[in-house]
């Protein structure tokens, strides 16, 4: 232990927790967890945020949405496979390197749509790029989740998730604004080359940000505790840790339906609503307001989940109730639109100057609210289970794996022409089922404080043996 680590300590119950003095000056600003989560947000602003802007246009901004749907199916299939093991990769390589490797696929994917605009026969390249991006995204999102949930103290997790989610969604906001400006004079159904070129440049900048981020091992939280980081042990002990995360905490499985449903709704919202009912400039505007509303949605639920006047268990149930109400508000409203059109009976494309547009865009704003609240609450529920970055890497890996498996299936269903109503009803049913399954986990597993005895993975040594609490404290 270094001299600085010996200077102060505190006890929480019977558990010894070291506290350290904060850095000062410019160094203090750089190593501040808030600064680093902002930088993490900008990594995802430049990559996944701009991907969302492109995807939110419906069909990746293409007139024919089939290629986009099939590319997304390939993307989420490889994402699901990679994400399941990416927690292990993250714990072995370290979060910064894993994050860096994960950023590369976004420029390739958006570039493939530019190629498709120039060469209409390049659909296979788009689908292949989607598969490659899935591998990269599995790495990026697992590293992101591990860092975002490890930086804050227990009573800051909702706030940190909201900060990240707000900055990340600015990527969708800015990207959609660029698309709207580029296509303002167009009443057609497809995006121009300039939009894709702008996105490619920005995603390229995003690759550089992880190189500038701080080493988490040198960071100190607001309460003086160190940001603990994985030990980078052997692959054998990491795979054992993946197994132990499930065996010693089986209630995690109750979150799996919620994870599975967490990207399912994008297909109906992006392709079957926005991509089907509106012309390209209005699709761009809708995408802009959708991602803007996500910023406010994440902040609203973040304030509730970090409300210090309530216990952590109470906050968990209040957050769950808000999600339940939002699911029914949004999908009852959505049904009023979906019942009036099918794939074979489409209405004329809506423009934002049409008289019936305001009610449609307000509905889309509420879709954005629900998405942000669902994702923020999912991360918060994981953060309420553990403070250990190694275990959080496994949890976020499970989250992204199951999320992507669901997305792969529903994007493929859209690609083969499953009726809009079937996709819509499956979305509603899965969201409700996810919340119902998660409720027992909140009762059994969420405590007002997470102690070392709850952190099995944190007590595992480099050989994969779980140490008793007393021995770990003694160190």
Image: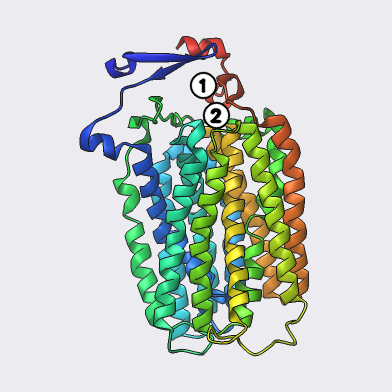
Residue indicated by mark 2 = 237
Q: CA distance from mark 2 to mark 1?
A: 8 Å
Residue 26 appearing in the image = yes
Name which of mark 2 and mark 1 comes first in the sequence.
Answer: 2
Rate crowding at label 2 as few (under 14), some (14 to 19) or many (20 or more) other CA atoms within 10 Å.
Answer: some
* Quarter location, residue 468: top right
- The extreme left residue here reads 25
Image location of residue 103, percent across then percent down: 41, 56
Counting the numbered discs, the total is: 2
Image spot of residue 15 (x, y percent): 52, 14
Q: Residue at x 38, y 25 (%)?
A: 224
Image quarter of the C terminus:
top left
Binning the other alpha carbons within 10 Å of mark 1 as few (below 14), some (14 to 19) or many (20 upward) gives: some
Asked which secondary structure carries label 2, the reply is helix
Q: Quadrant of the N terminus?
A: top left
Up-down relation of residue 321 to residue 198 (above or below): above
Q: Residue at x 64, y 55 (%)?
A: 262
Please say if the residues under marks 2 and 1 sit with CB atoms less than 8 Å apart: yes
The reply, left or right, for residue 144 in relation to residue 204 is right
Residue 399, above or below 24: below
Side of 398 where 342 appears, left or right: right
Please state if 312 lies on the left or on the right of 114 as rendered.
right
* Residue 470: image location, x then y, percent: 54, 10
Kindly identify which residue carries mark 1.
Answer: 461
Towards the viewer: 346 or 162: 162
Q: Residue at x 72, y 36 (%)?
A: 441
Q: Is 199 rendered above or below residue 237?
A: below
Q: Which mark is residue 128?
A: none
């Amino acid at each position: 232990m270094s001299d600085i680590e010996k200077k102060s300590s505190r006890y929480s119950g019977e558990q010894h927790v070291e506290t350290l003095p904060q850095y000062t000056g410019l160094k203090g600003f750089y190593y501040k967890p808030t600064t680093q989560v902002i930088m993490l947000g900008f990594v995802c602003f430049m990559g996944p945020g701009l991907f969302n802007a492109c995807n939110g246009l419906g069909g990746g901004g293409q007139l024919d949405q089939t290629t986009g749907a099939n590319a997304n199916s390939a993307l989420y299939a490889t994402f699901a496979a990679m994400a399941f093991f990416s927690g292990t990769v993250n714990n072995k390589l370290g979060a910064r390197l894993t994050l860096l490797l994960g950023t590369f696929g976004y420029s390739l994917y958006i570039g493939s749509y530019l190629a498709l605009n120039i060469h209409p026969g390049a659909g296979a390249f788009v689908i292949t790029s989607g598969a490659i991006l899935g591998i990269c995204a599995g790495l990026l999102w697992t590293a992101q989740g591990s860092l975002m949930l490890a930086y804050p103290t227990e009573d800051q997790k909702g706030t940190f998730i909201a900060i990240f989610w707000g900055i990340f969604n600015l990527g969708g906001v800015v990207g959609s604004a660029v698309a709207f400006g580029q296509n303002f004079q167009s009443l057609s159904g497809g995006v121009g080359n300039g939009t894709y070129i702008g996105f490619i440049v920005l995603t390229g900048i995003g690759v550089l940000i992880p190189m500038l981020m701080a080493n988490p091992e040198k960071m100190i939280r607001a309460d003086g505790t160190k940001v603990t980081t994985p030990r980078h042990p052997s692959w054998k002990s990491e795979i054992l840790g993946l197994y132990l995360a499930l065996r010693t905490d089986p209630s995690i499985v109750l979150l799996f339906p919620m994870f599975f449903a967490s990207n399912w709704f994008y297909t109906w919202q992006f392709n079957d609503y926005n991509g089907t009912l509106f012309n390209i400039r209005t699709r761009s505007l809708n995408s802009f307001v959708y991602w803007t509303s996500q910023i406010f949605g994440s902040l609203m639920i973040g304030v509730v989940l970090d409300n210090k006047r309530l216990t952590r268990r109470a906050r968990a149930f209040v957050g769950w109730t808000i999600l339940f109400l939002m699911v029914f508000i949004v999908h009852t409203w959505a049904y009023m639109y979906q019942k009036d059109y099918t794939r074979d009976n489409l209405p004329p494309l809506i423009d934002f100057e049409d008289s019936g547009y305001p009610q449609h865009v307000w509905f889309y704003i509420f879709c954005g609210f629900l998405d942000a609240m669902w994702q923020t609450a999912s991360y918060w529920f994981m953060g309420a289970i553990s403070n250990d970055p190694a275990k959080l890497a496994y949890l976020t890996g499970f989250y992204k794996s199951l999320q992507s498996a669901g997305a792969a299936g529903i994007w493929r269903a859209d690609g083969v022409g499953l009726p809009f109503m079937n996709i819509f009803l499956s979305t509603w049913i899965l969201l409700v089922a996810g919340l119902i399954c998660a409720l027992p986990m909140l009762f059994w597993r969420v405590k007002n404080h997470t102690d070392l005895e709850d952190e099995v993975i944190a007590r595992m040594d480099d050989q994969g043996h779980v140490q008793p609490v007393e021995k770990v404290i003694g160190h």
